[in-house]
Amino acid sequence: MGLSTHARRQVQRQATRLIAERFRDPLRRNALAGLLERTAEGWHLAVRTGAPGTADAFLIGRAGVFAVVVTDPAPDEATMREVARDAEERFAGLPGPGGQRIARSAVTLVAIVGADSSPGPRNAGPFWSLPAAKLDQLFRRDTVHLTARQAAKIADGLAARLRGYEWLTVSAPEKEAGSFELLSAESVADEQLIAAVERPFETWMTFLHPDQAALAARNYSGPARISGPAGTGKTVVALHRMRHVGRRSTGPLLFTTFVRTLPPVNETTFRRLAPELADRAQFVSLHAWARAFLQRRGIELNTHSRLTKDAFGRAWKEHREPLERLGPNYDYWETEVQRIIKGQGIRTLEKYQSIHRARRGLRLDRGQREKVWQLYTAYEENLAANGLHDFHDLLSRASIELERQPLEEPYASVVVDEAQDMTLTGLRLLRTIAGDGPNQLLLVGDGQQQVYPGGWRLSDAGIPIQGRGEVLKVNYRNRASILDFARRINAVDDLDGAAGVALRDADSVNEGGVVQSWTGTPAELPDALAAAVRALEIPLGETALITFSNADADQCRRLLESAGVPTRALERYVGAAEDRLHVGTVHRAKGLDFRAVLVVQLPRPAPEDPAEQEEQHELRSRQRLVAATRARDFLWWGAVQS
Ligand SMILES: Nc1ncnc2c1ncn2[C@@H]1O[C@H](COP(=O)(O)OP(=O)(O)OP(=O)(O)O)[C@@H](O)[C@H]1O
C-alpha cells in the first residue's frame, strides 16, 4: 500500500469497523476488511447484504474484476460454477474503450478460504482458492492492466446491475489521499513502474471486441478454427477461450504450437489472465509433447538433429544428380522430403504420385517424383541403419501409440496456435489427442503468415470444421503507419483452399506509429544499425531485431554486441521485459510482438528456375509480412543490397 504507517492504521480501523457492523463470522470479517482497506487505493468493493447463492463480494480495480466467495470449508465446484455464471451475467457486455465490452471470461472467481481448510490442488479448478492470509496476491502489480478511470467506469456500470449488495469504501487521511490519488490514478511515475514490469494496459485481459468476446464464449459441437490477419487478437481469444472452457470442464488443458519458443510466452500471459487454471494448463510445443508422451510409454526415439541432417546429406550425395538438373537447390529437395513427403505422412510412391503439392513451385511429373522418392528412401534407410528418427517420426510414432492406447487422462480442450505452420502429420496427431468432441479442438492461424514451405487442407488431416470457421478482422497490434507498410507486402493466403481475410482488409484501431526504411551496402550496415539502435526511444527490452535466417541473426548479433548493445537470442524470450535487445529469425518471432522492431534483410541468391523463384518469392513475402507485423509502435526496415 502506498500510505504511511499512520494512514494505513487509520484505514484498517475504518475497514474493520465497517465490516464488523455487518458481519459476525471471523473469516468473513477478516477477509472482507482486508479487501475494503484497498478501496483507499482506488479499488471498488460491493459486499452482499442479501440472500446467499451469489458472490459474497465484487472487487474491481486496476488488476481486473473479481467475484469473491468467503468460505470455510473450501467450496465445492458445483456451487462455485453457479456463482461464476451469475457473476459472468452481471459483468457481461459492460462497455469499455473503443466499442469493446467486458468478456465473460474476464471475471476472476476467487474463494477466500480459512487457513485450515484444504483447498485441494492449488490453481487447478474453476476458481482461485486463496487463504485469507494471502489476500495480497489479488493486488499483484504484474497483473495491472486497467486505468483507474476504466475500473471506476466498470464499477459504475455494475452498480446498476447489483441488487442486494452494498458499496463500501474507506479513505486515507485527506493529506495522504491527495498524494495517493496522484499515484493511483494516472500518475506518470506509476505508469512507468508498471511499464517496467509489463506492457501498460493490456486491456484485453478485461475488454474484448464484441466479435472476440463472442468467439471466446461460443459453444462448438466439434473442432473449430479461428483465422484472421496478423494482430487481430487470435491468440488473445484462444487464451480467453481456454479459460472459459476450463471453467466449465474438468481435466487438463493443452496449448501447443509447432515452434518451441512460443508456448512459454503464452504461458506467462495465461498465468496472468487465469491464475486459477495455471496448474491445469500445459503449454508445450507439439514435438516436446510427443517426446514426453512416448517416454511415459517407455518409448525413446533418438532424434539427434545433427545426425539426422548427416543422414540426409549422405542420401543427397547419392541421388543429387537428376534432381540438380531440375533445380540445383539442396534446400528445395530437403524441404520436399521434409515438409511434403514426411510432413504429410506419405508412405508410398503411389500416394506421392497422386498428391497435389500445394505451394511448391516446381511441377514434377511421375518420373521426377520417382527420383525424389529414391532420395527419400535412401534417407529413411540411413536413419534406420543408425537407429535414428527425425521430428516427423516423433509425431507419427506418437499418433500410432495414441491410437493403440488412448490417453489415461483426456484433455478437456486443446488449442493449436499458429496452426498454419503445422505439418499434416502434426495435425493428425492433434486430432487424435483432442478428438472431435464439443469444444475439444481449436485451431488458430493465418495462412498469410505461413513461414515454412508447403501447404495442406484441414480436410486432409480429417479435421471436420464445417460451419465452425471464424474470422477476426480488427487489428489491435500495429499502429496505423506500420499496418500501412505491412499491407503493401503482397503475401497470398491460399492455405486450406479458402480465400481468407488478408491483412489489407483488416481494420485498424491504433493511430500513429513510425516506420523508417534504410537501404545500403553490407559495409554500411554496422553504422546504420548502431545509429538506429542509438536513436530508439523505446527501451531495448521491448525491442526485437528480426532476420530471415539464423546466419543473418548471428551476424546482426555480433554487429550489435561490438557496438556495445546488449542482446539476447529470441529463443530465450518468455515475455518478461529485460534491458536487452532480442535478436532472432522470423521463425522465432512469429506470434510475438514488440513495441519496436528492427528488420534486417540481407541479400540472398535467387534460384534460377522461374517456378522455384516464384515459390521463394511467395514464402519471403509471407515472412516479411510476419516480420513487419511484429512491431507495435516503431519499425525500422533495413534492406541490404549487394
Ligand atoms: N481486445 C483487445 N484490446 C486491446 N488489445 C488487444 C485486443 N486484442 C488483441 N490485442 C493486442 O493485439 C496484439 C495482437 O494480439 P494477438 O497476438 O492475440 O493477435 P494474433 O491475431 O494472434 O496475431 P498474429 O497472427 O500476428 O500472431 C497483442 O499485443 C494484444 O495484446
Image (spheres, rainbow, N blue to C red):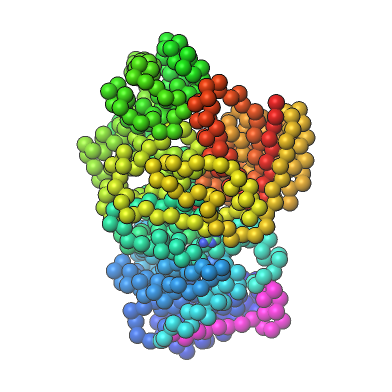
Q: Is residue 181 left or right of residue 34?
A: right
State whether residue 430 is above or below residue 391: below
The magenta stretch spans residue 352: no
Query: Percent position (x, y) of residue 2?
Result: 65, 71
In the rendered image, the quadrant that contains the C terminus is: top right
Q: Nearer the viewer, residue 399 or 71?
A: 399
Task: Give the residue at x 31% y 66%.
Answer: 77
Furthest residue in direction bottom, as rendered: 21
Query: Percent position (x, y) of residue 66?
Result: 46, 71
Q: Nearer the viewer, residue 576 or 332?
A: 332
Q: Is residue 624 visible?
A: yes
Per the rendered image, the range of residues in magenta is 165-183
Task: Give the residue at x 48% y 74%.
Answer: 94
**Where on the picture, by quarter, is residue 433?**
top left
Q: Nearer the viewer, residue 40 or 31?
A: 40
In the rendered image, the quadrant that contains the N terminus is: bottom right
Query: Percent position (x, y) of residue 290?
Result: 35, 37
Q: Is residue 16 left or right of residue 640?
A: left
Q: Is residue 135 visible?
A: no
Query: Percent position (x, y) of residue 65?
Result: 49, 70
**Where on the picture, by quarter, is residue 7?**
bottom right
Q: Is residue 52 left or right of residue 321?
A: left
Task: Give the residue at x 52% y 86%.
Answer: 17
State whether residue 365 is above or below residue 582: above
Task: Give the residue at x 35% y 59%.
Answer: 245
Q: Nearer the viewer, residue 608 or 25?
A: 608
| Count of numbered badges drawn on the protein | 0
